[in-house]
Image (cartoon, rainbow, N blue to C red):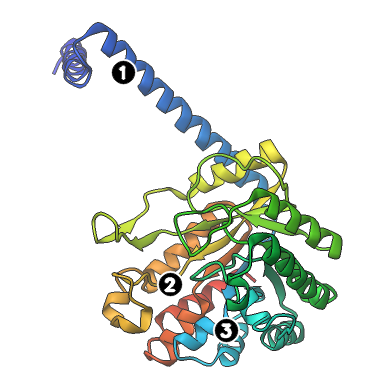
Amino acid sequence: MPQHHTKLSLKKGLAIAKSRLLPKNKWLRRISLVVVALVLLFTGTSYGIAQWYIHGERSKPLELGVSFIPYYASSLGVDPQQTFDGLLGIGVKHFRLVSYWNAGEPNQGSYDFSALDWQFAKAEKAGAHITLTVGLRQPRWPECHMPDWAKAEPTTTWTVQLEAYMKAVVERYKNSPALENYQLENEYFLKGFGECTDYSRQRLVNEYALVKQTDPRHPVIVGRSNNDLGTPIGDPTPDEYSVSVYKRVWDAGFTHRYLEYPFPAWSYATLAGVQKITKGKDMVIGELQAEAWPPNGKTIPEISLAEQNKSMNAKRLKDRFQYGEATGMRGINLWGGEYWYYRLTVLHDPSLWNVAKQEFKNAE
């Protein structure tokens, strides 16, 4: 075909596409073009910030870890101490541990630190590091772990009692060589999930001041919730922030199907980059989903292995490790270590365990 015919064809094609895609009304067409330009500008700027952040963090060492909750291991039918030992055995050197108020103070004024004591002892012996969550809201349902004896108390009373417990926790473990930092509360302002009733910013500010006063040596992390846009505003301004990253969940509200969030990894790098620009603070992944999400409100032991594989199998787990690293964040705590051990020992399926073992080896 002659060159001038090719140019004419291209012009004609663009004209047809423009006439079909854009409104015929002159003002609507102008508005549409402005909207498209703004979307492109926003996307380009976001991507640019993400690449700036990823490049700037690349020289820092990658620290992979897992969240670990003894009661959750027990609910899966596995021994918590054997699970912890197993995770150490595949190379896990960082644990995010919990200090549930209802477990640590089952009776008012009577503390029970036996579970945390053995976790710290094992971590210290193995040379592992610990992020210790403190406060009322901590990982796993029902999120806010208040003891029964405190539930009837007015807010002004139980907040004082909670702070006394938090101070006791910090005092007990602040000199452990395994302690790396604290996470204060967990997705504190997330109102759509969990059995929580108090979202007072002042309580969060007071708790932050308490932890820093009791232990000024260790950094304190405050966790934002999953997939939120923007940058944190208001007090407290912690030493670091964390974000939760979930990719495949069961949508119980609308579709009643598994839902895969479409966010690219670099979108989280944008969140971290904007935060670093505006707040001057780093971000880590506090929870990276690495276990199955059961449908219809069921627990994992209530569903088949085939059903579990619909939301988490070996390929998805490997992809999840890669996704986490692609965000540029260098601290990543995976959510599901107890689940990998359950698949290995109860379901006799080593596929997830083997993936995790290889990924932790690669990160050494």
Mark with earlier residue (2, 1): 1
Residue 218 shown left or right of residue 43 in the figure? right
Question: Which residue lies most toward the top here?
Answer: 26
Q: Mark 1 points at which residue?
A: 32
Q: What element carries label 2?
A: loop
User: On screen, 146 above or below 229?
Assistant: below
Residues packed near mark 2 inside 10 Å, few (<14), some (14 to 19) or many (20 plus): many
Percent x, y for residue 223? 61, 56
Quadrant including the C terminus: bottom right
Give the labeled residue for mark 2. 291
How packed mark 3 is, by other alpha carbons closer than 10 Å (few <14, some 14-19, many 20 or more), is some
Q: Which one is nearer the viewer's eye here, 190 or 57?
A: 190
Label 2 is placed on what type of residue? Glu
Label 1 packing within 10 angstroms: few (<14), some (14-19), many (20+): some
- Report whether 8 appears left or right of 215: left
> Residue at 51% across / 54% down in the picture?
190
Nearer the observer, 120 or 211:
211
Q: Mark 3 points at which residue?
A: 70
**Label 3 – label 2 distance at C-alpha:** 16 Å
Quadrant position of the N terminus in the picture: top left
Kindly state the secondary structure of the residue where label 3 is placed: helix
Separation of residues labelled 1 and 3 (CA atoms): 54 Å
Kindly indicate the quadrant of the structure image that contains residue 203. bottom right
Residue type at the position of mark 3: Pro
The first of marks 1 and 3 along the sequence is 1
